[in-house]
Image (cartoon, rainbow, N blue to C red):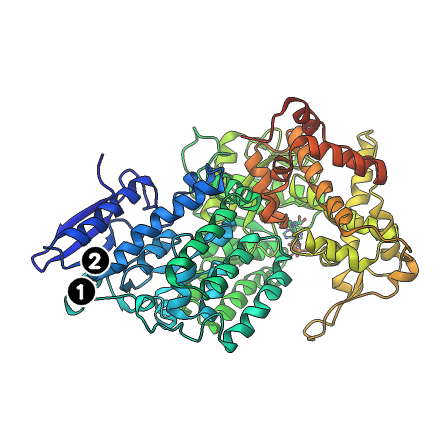
Amino acid sequence: MTEAIQFQLGGDGILLATIDLPGRPMNVLNGITGAAIETMVQRLETDPEVLGLVITSGKKDFLAGADLEGIRDITTAQEAFDLSMVMKRQLRRLEKCGKPAVAVIHGMCFGGGFELTLACHHRIAVTGARLGTPEVKLGLLPGGGGTQRLPRLIGMQAAMPLLCEGGEVKADKALTLGMVHALAPSREAAIEQARAWCLANPKVQQPWDAPKFRYPGGDSRSPAVAQMLAIAPAMAAAKSWNNYPAITHIMSCVFEGGLVDFDAALLIESRYFAACVVSPESKNMLNTLWFQLNAIKKGASRPPAVPASKVRKLGILGAGMMGAGIAYVSAKVGIECVLLDTTQEAADKGKAYSQDLLDKALKKGRGTAEQRDALLARITPTTSYEALAGCDLVIEAVFEDRAVKADVTKKAEAVIGAGAVFASNTSTLPITGLATASARPASFIGLHFFSPVDKMPLVEIIVGKATSPETLAKGFDYVMQIGKTPIVVNDSRGFYTSRVFGTYVMEGIAMLAEGVHPRSIEVAGLQAGMPMPPLALQDEVSLSLGLHVADQTRKDLAAEGKPYAEHPGMAVVRQLCEIGRIGKKAGHGFYDWPAAGSKGEKTLWPGLAQLFPVAAQQPAQRELIDRLMFAQANEAARCYGEGVLRSVADGNIGSIFGWGFAPFHGGALQFINAMGAKRFVERSRELAARYGARFEPAAVVVAQAETGRRFAD
Ligand code: NAD
């Protein structure tokens, strides 16, 4: 077996250790790297010729973190505790052996990689390096001493947000914060600096091992820090609603670790690390936000036989809110964009959207004027279909109207080449129906973006009945090209995301009609872990749009001779629309909204109490939360059962990235897996008996409850 670290002892007595895990594009901490670190530490401790150590990486990045497969497979807290202690003992020996160790950091240096560098006596970051402790984002915490070394290095106050939010820090900011000691323009220059530092500092000790060590800014007992520590849990809970135990565990590590000596603090950290590893929240997030997301990004839902493609020229029909956003995100990655609308003024306005975003970014110090101008030069606003000649892909984002969409489809197809793909960004109209306007339905596909396009990470790709695998592959490659995450679903009314998202808001609205206090409904949404409460969300989307879609659905189903069962929440929406309370855009919906530009806060409309009197007996919050979550999970399971969803990964990632389904549950299908099909079916039936047939468990979950199977790809 090739070793994960190559050693080179210089004539100056400095040992250069280059981490280069064989067969992997990135360095990660696993058994093989662990063994190599052991060899490295031993050599530093025992080889008299070695006077100092410089650790660097032989890959593009320093080290991305721990191998998460190993963490996923851990089932007991003892295993997790032992694993973290193995690494800690090595790092402790490294920093206590008396000889200098310097880390040369380039590229990504995250998680366990950053913790390894924290055990070095000196850190030099190469320009462009990014450092951080992102463990919390997967429900974990830095279990290699990170929660102890970082606060002792930069102070509790500065360390807490880094540890609890998991953001990354660029090299220059890391220097300002004190996370690294020096910067260097290149890896080679950094190695030279590192050697010189070792030679200049032959006897070293970590600050926390010095007898008179004091935390910068004070420890857990100091009044200034105590004030922060007292309010930090409440501040975190206001955002997380205590749904993320890792955040609380990190704060406990920092606080408790600040009361004891360093070695005792490391034990405390390992205990909390173990609690995180075996928590359902971490299992859920690892499953979905790591393994399933990576599977999607590696093309699990893309037809494998089709060669990779790139869009060079993109046509966008309709320069409204969506078209303008699509032009921006595409031009940003170098795609030439033709932005077409019915008038030059409308097309120009669409381009101005990009100008506006770029100007704002520039003011905040992001990007340069040259980059802005180059991006803008790639967007050509026009009214002429001739300009679409040579496009590899055309996306229509005109009004949500079948006739208008059919008209632009025909006009564009008359110009673009035979190999080009035509995509619709419709949010509600089935793709197979829209494709009837196309002369080549095999090249017709749905690319459903979310608003605002520049911020939302997901694109839902909808495969119509006639869509070919080549078209799907091209659509998929384009979504990856613009840096978004694609999910692939089969055609259906509302596709996957709009259909399931609707059950969340509608359930909240139905509660209002039953006499549940609107404030309880909104709080239940947030407690459930959703980013926005249901009534406020419907106001944002607009009640009139909801009503319009419902009426259209009723008409379509009647034409197909199919029954239409209206959600009880829709009666409430209709009632509000009738009195002009159509949502945020009108300033009035479930809330009274402050005028655009004013600093006021939205407030629940007091008139709701007259329309929907609050019942004397209020249900428990748990009941409300379950209704909101079971409604979504059941609808997602139905999508899976009906074949709208083509994979579990798409279902889970689509729910989190598309409408913010509580991430700690790991997505709408993982919600059922984590609970177990049996319990899910029982609780669904209870809810169905109380609130209606919409809660009857999806057939696919009932079958799982009988067979013991679960959602898996
Ligand atoms: P919009 O009203 O902001 O923009 C539509 C644009 O299309 C307008 O600029 C209009 O002038 C132009 N247009 C209309 N007819 C045209 C024609 N014949 N030829 C060329 N241009 C024409 O609407 P939007 O919110 O950008 O939505 C566009 C599409 O995207 C709709 O199908 C909508 O359902 C879908 N969508 C919207 C959202 C959203 O949140 N707004 C999200 C996903 C999908």
Q: Using residue 8 as the reference point, say whether residue 667 is left or right of it.
A: right
State the image quarter where residue 696 is shown: top right
At 71% across and 36% down in the image, what residue appears?
A: 634
Give the crowd class for mark 1: few <14, some 14-19, many >=20 residues within 10 Å.
many
In this view, the residue in front, 600 or 581, is 600
> Is residue 597 in sight in this rendering?
yes
Residue 245 horizontal/vertical position (percent): 57, 53
The residue pinned by badge 2 equals 54
Q: Are marks 2 and 1 in contact (CB under 8 Å)?
A: yes
What is the distance, in whole Å, between disc 2 and disc 1 at their CAs? 8 Å
Judging by the rendered image, the residue that carries numbered circle 1 is 198
Q: Looking at the image, which residue sits at the far left?
A: 11
Q: Quadrant of residue 712?
A: top right
Q: Secondary structure at mark 2?
A: strand
Q: Is residue 520 above or below residue 20?
A: below
Residue at screen point 22% across, 34% down:
1
